[in-house]
Image (tube, helix red, strand yellow):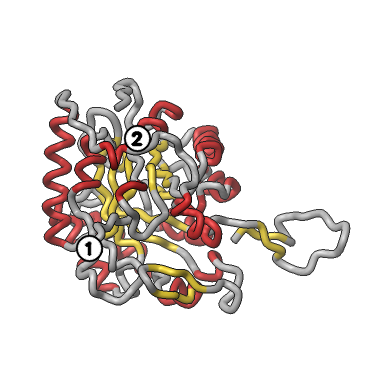
Amino acid sequence: MVMHASIPPVRVGTRRIGSGEPLFFIAEIGLNHNQDFDMAKQLIDVAAQAGCSAAKFQTFRARDVYIGQNLAGTYHLMGKEIPIYDLHASLEMPEDWVIKLSEYCTKLDIVFFSAPIGQAATEMLLSAGTSVFKISSYECSNLPFVRYVASKGKPIILSTGAATLGEIEAAVLTIQRAGVPLAVMHCLTCYPASFRCANLSVMDTLRSAFEIPVGFSDNGFAYESGKIDDTRVPLAAAQGGADLFEIHITLDRSLPGPDHGFATEPDELKKMVTAMNSVRQEYNDGRRFDIDLELWGSSVKRTYPEEEYVRTFAYKCLFAAKDIDSGKKLTEDNVCIL
């Protein structure tokens, strides 16, 4: 495990993320509000009562994510084929929710933030007074968007699922050139993943490469029985020195929706936060833990075979926004990134 006590912390509101600081625990509500405002508030309640540092959402419009309703195709998730465009359209966060949920989080002393997709979503969050932006794994290689978000001057948490080290470096340098504080999260774009894919030692690779706070974004790990892990990976991440940790939460894994089935339920979340905070305190006090070798895995950051499927359709590509005559230059007016 790599130690860098000199790495400056990232300030998010009144909290600090970094070496020697308490664990910054992010409850990823994401899409699990099911477009139900009361459910969104209930999930914030769950996060606050468990002692989480932040409640995170995803802010987008389906038209800004995919090329069209009939062209987006389907997504294979946990044994089901899901129409991608229709799914995302049904889970868009209404604009008037943003300020209301932000204010509700402030009332409960928990950070509200979100991963925007597109400039309109970024501006929506900015107008609600967000104190930090999340750049999702799928936007990691979208440098024009990374540059746009960084230009807003807010701290950024960057996820890196399915990205190569070179792609991460390009994103990190883009953000740092804007003078914006940055933390980076090792992540896997598998929903859920097998334990052999965790490769938690990549956290050390990222910390050594960029000398910034580093954490782990947990998109769910499943035992062979199908049971979703709520202990092994979270504790190993804390034992390995994660400065921040993110995990999907739900009121009930049996609820309809793409992300409920691998998310953490309220009772599990409370126990998880308590256990990880205890480990973090011991880590900050100098204790070093025995490594779970299967979870520690490889330190090489690359696109793992298990991530290729998601990367193929979710990472951003260049598309023609209109018919382009032969010989015409490609410009922002005639191409788009989707």
- Position above or below: 333 against 152: below
Outermost residue on the top side: it is: 6
What's the CA distance linking mark 2 and mark 1? Answer: 26 Å
Q: Position of residue 280 (x, y in %)?
A: 18, 35
Residue at the image point whose x is 45% and y is 57% from the top: 116
Q: Is residue 36 left or right of residue 142?
A: left
Q: Position of residue 147 (x, y in %)?
A: 56, 44
The residue that mark 2 highlights is: 201
Q: Quadrant of the C terminus?
A: bottom right
Outermost residue on the front side: it is: 224
Q: Nearer the viewer, mark 2 or mark 1?
A: 1
Find residue 225 and name its label.
Answer: 1
Q: Position of residue 77 (x, y in %)?
A: 40, 68
Residue at the image point whose x is 42% and y is 46% from the top: 159
Q: Quadrant of residue 71?
A: bottom right
**Looking at the picture, which amino acid does disc 2 mark?**
Ser
Residue at the image point whose x is 32% and y is 25% from the top: 2
Outermost residue on the right side: it is: 327
Quick one: SS at disc 2?
Answer: loop
- Position above or below: 331 against 35: above
Is residue 104 among what the camera can see? Answer: no
Q: Is residue 300 left or right of residue 40?
A: right
Q: Quadrant of the N terminus?
A: top left
Quick one: SS at disc 1?
Answer: loop
Residue at the image point whose x is 71% and y is 63% from the top: 320
**Looking at the picture, which amino acid does disc 1 mark?**
Ser
